[in-house]
Amino acid sequence: MTADLHTLAGAYVLHALSPEELAEFERHLSDCDSCALEVRELAATTQRLGAAVATAPPPEMRVRVLRQIATVRQEPPEVPPERAGRVRTRRIGGVIPRLVLAACVAGALLGGGVAAWQYQEARDARDQAQLAERSNDELMGVLTSPDVVVESTGLDDGATGTVLVSAERDRAVFVASGMAEPPAGMVYQLWFDDDGTMRPGGLMDPADGPTGSAVLMDGPVNGAGGMGITLEPAGGSPQPTSDPLLVMAFPEAG
Amino acid sequence: MKEPVYIGENPSTAPDLSELLVRVAQGDHEAFGSVYDAMSGPVFGLVRSILRDPAQSEEVAQEVMVEVWRNAARYRPEKGSAMAWTMTLAHRRAVDRVRSAQASSDREQRAALLEHTPAFDEVTEQVETRLEREQVRRCLRTLTELQRQSVTLAYYRGLTYREVAELLALPLGTVKTRMRDGLIRLRDCLGVTA
């Protein structure tokens, strides 16, 4: 079976397979490294066949193409395989801008400034980010989730709070930007807003880095309608002991 | 139609198409102009060898070049050269056009497409890219007749391997095998590396 499929490599690069065989071969290709190499080489070979019949197109075509591209939107790069499969099946229009934002957030978090949704890079930067392994995985999972929704609010002092929620994972990530250091002995505490009742959502631990960090909120969203932040004594409180610095409704999914 | 055509990836003079594509992906129109100049000849020539009809060929070649603009960010250098990527796109588009003409059961259109497809030698008469053409022609001669026909009927005419088998009255398995070992022999003769 495998040997038989392997012989399709030639017909494959020549686009000479039926749609069914094409699908079958591509499945095979995805876990056959030697086939993938052969396909690359044979495709490079057919390219030479093509180049051998090069013919200058009419000069007007250049003008038309250059005019046309001015009105054509360019596709973003594909996201890596771990998450890409699910992203592609979604409505691209609604999802990509959020992913881009999520990537920016992740980039800021990890100090890479690059597409940190690239999972491998996130892993490499893990130590540097000094985040617990599990919660970082979970955090990246939220940031890269195809259904992530995003909401931002400005605070009085010019700081910005951004919350990203994935309904699928039932988790939320809060990102603060430009927030002042908490006073000595105090800590920022996050809360889920369960219809008016505040449920502890974790601390923004200064040990996690400056307040430009992303924090995976403790526990599931579990239907909470929003979140808030208060200033609490070090170690946090079972319920808020001060007025919230910020209250945000979670964005609606999708 | 007789002006010289630039062929990409001539090591001494070619701009680095992969680098140019990176800039194209960032929305660089000037880089796209260079990519167009390097690629439009091979693209148009290949599409025309498959479709023959000049107006259709121009239309499809134009679509391919716009596709290069649109999808530049999807190009992955580790999967092959920029030129191979583009030519794969061009071949796929031209073949799709042939097959949709077949699917629409427009017999006249189909007949026109197939009848007017010249043999490889005739196609290459119109090409100014002599070195490339000569080398490819020489290497094609190292193939067996069946290998050569299987490869060129699929590549330059856009036939499926089943159609090739039908046309040459050969078993399907034979054609499949000839396509692969024919291309492997070509690869070795041309010194192609991935």
Image (cartoon, coloured by chain):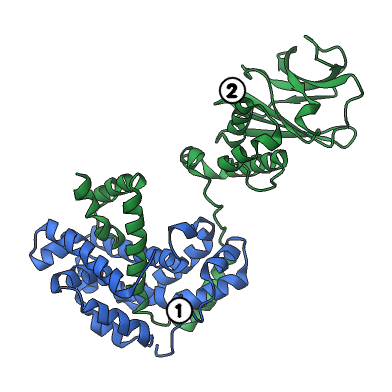
The residue identified by callout 2 is: A170
Which is in the foreground here, disc 2 or disc 1?
1
Please identify which colour was used for chain B in the image: blue
In the rendered view, does B79 fall on the left or right side of A66? Answer: left
Measured in 3D between alpha carbons, the distance from the residue under mark 2 to the one under mark 1, in whole angstroms, is 54 Å
The residue identified by callout 1 is: B10
- Of all residues, the one furthest to the bottom in this rendering is B2
Q: Residue at x 59, y 30 (%)?
A: A137
The chain to which mark 2 is attached is A
Q: Residue at x 69, y 23 (%)?
A: A217
The chain to which mark 1 is attached is B
Location of residue B33 by image quarter: bottom right
- Of all residues, the one furthest to the front in this rendering is A127
Q: Position of residue B17 (x, y in %)?
A: 52, 70
Q: Is residue B59 shown to the viewer in this render?
A: yes
Disc 1 residue type? Asn
Classed neighbour count for the residue bearing mark 2: other residues with Cα under 10 Å, few (<14), some (14–19), many (≥20): some
Q: Which mark is residue B67?
A: none
How many labels, in total?
A: 2
